[in-house]
Amino acid sequence: MNDWTSGYVAEIGYTYGYYPELNPLRAKWIALLRGVAVSQGLGTSAGVSCELGFGQGVSVNIHSAATGSQWWGTDFNPSQAAFAKGLADSPEAASRLFDLSFEEFAKLDLPEFDFIGFHGIWSWISDSNRKIITDFVRAKLKVGGVVYLSYNTQPGWSASMPLRHLFTEHALRLASPGSGIVNRVDGALAFVDKLIATQPKYLLANPQIPDRIARIKEHERAYLAHEYFNRDWHPMHFAQTAEVLGEAKLGFLGSAAYLELVDGLNLSEAQRGLLSDVADPIFQETVKDFCFNQQFRRDLWCKGGRRLSSIAQVEAIRSARFILVQLRKLVPNKVSGYLGEADLQPALYGPVLDFLADNRPHSFEEIERHVAEHKITHLQLREILTVLLGANALAPAQSDEAAESARAQCERINTKLLIAARADGGISYLASPVLGGGVAVTRFHQLFLLARQLGYKGAHEWANWAHGVLQSQKQNILKEGRALETPEENLAELQNQAHGFAAVQLPILINLGVAKD
């Protein structure tokens, strides 16, 4: 029999996650910081993008709707591809989604792409499939195009690799045939608990393993099945990945994790001094991975990116737009890097946040003009905005024209997602035409939005309607780890959440184009 899965877990669907790093608009800011000119279509409605291995298709559909740009993609799992196509099922949808293998997809008559993203597949596929992806990128990425790639890496996985091997060996050799992947996952976890209880020398040599196992158990079984139980699993050193992608003419652009771009948050003075003597950028990243004990990288790569002159770089940076996606008073005064927590200095961050407190898009140039009286330099402002982006307080914003052209498609996909929230909270993001991507919205907040859309007035009515939805399915609210048992308790909690939503989240969602005024 032909094994179309190639050893990849396919009997249980992947999680319904949204991955903001797949938004090309985010990559554009990092390219500007690096002084690299990328494809003109990147992060615009005219851009053409591709996601390989799109899972349930939440990211690819949100990005297609929120930018109005054309997205192509494939996921070999037909049930996942069917769900993704269902989200995109409208005559105006700009996404072209398939359930083909990478090899089959590469043979289609495809356009050239400004952006190609693949999250969560590079480490979990065979060498032959990685070669297919590399050849595809070389053939189909435009000059100046950007690739986003996330993958497991070393040295962070070195201690846990034997544990993963134990999981898969137990599932292969001791699990009952036909027992199902969830039972195999649970059986492997239970066996590892028994092994740990015997105090093996592996545990003595790696005392962090029990904590890692505890964190593993917190994840959904669907996630664990795809993360730990595939046939192929190859955490690659950064230099190995760079060598493979070099065959596709790709050069390293930078980390897609904003906070990793700020050395002061992540590297000690001694480490920064050591790295200052390392001229080779590939070896620099290798050394950083040892400093961070890195186990998961989120990287951006560029094909033939042209260096911008200093004048052109400053002009392009000044045209970039940003929006505060939290209430000013709720923005944390600390941020965490690999060195631990760092304070956001009020003298630097306060004036910037005060100007952005209207939760509307503003250009770098506008912000720079406003904070000039506070003696905040151009370079300081670059870092301030990057830190706020990494803290998820800030997000890149599209032009007003692009946002307006994407508004109708966002309304359509958001309505589908709101209707789906009646049954469960599997998808906790909605599409924002302002962001050109997704914004986190909890299930209950989605129910309040749907009630509002249906004509119910005010927090009291939204909560009553949401309570009826939950009661009809015999679903109770969890609060502080305890299920609320009585209808009165559940309704009171919904009333409390609805009033908080009306005061805090709703005004921001209106400004993001997720809800109507």
Image (tube, grey):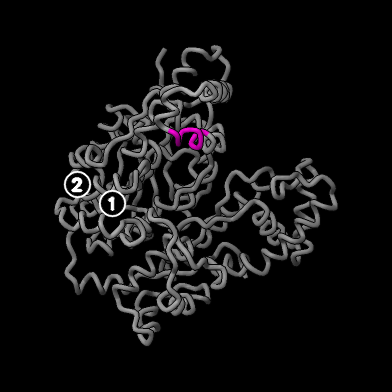
| Residue 121, visible in the rendered structure | yes
- Check the image and report above or below for 317 versus 448: below
| Residue 8, visible in the rendered structure | no
- Check the image and report above or below for 481 versus 200: below
Direction from residue 420 to residue 39 in the image, left or right:
left
The residue lying at 37 percent from left, 87 percent from top is 373
Which numbered mark, 2 or 1, is in the foreground of this view?
2
What's the CA distance linking mark 2 and mark 1?
Answer: 21 Å
Q: Which residues are magenta?
A: 207-213
First in residue order: circle 2 vs circle 1: 1
Report the number of numbered marks: 2
The residue lying at 43 percent from left, 76 percent from top is 352
In front of the other: 495 or 415: 495
In front of the other: 255 or 348: 348
The residue lying at 24 percent from left, 47 percent from top is 287
Where the N terminus falls, by quadrant?
A: top left
How far across and down, in percent of the image, does residue 201 sit? 42, 23
Where the C terminus falls, by quadrant?
A: bottom right
Disc 2 residue type?
Answer: Phe
Magenta residue check for 430: no
Magenta residue check for 210: yes
Residue at which label 2 appears? 283
> Residue 237 sits in which quadrant?
top left
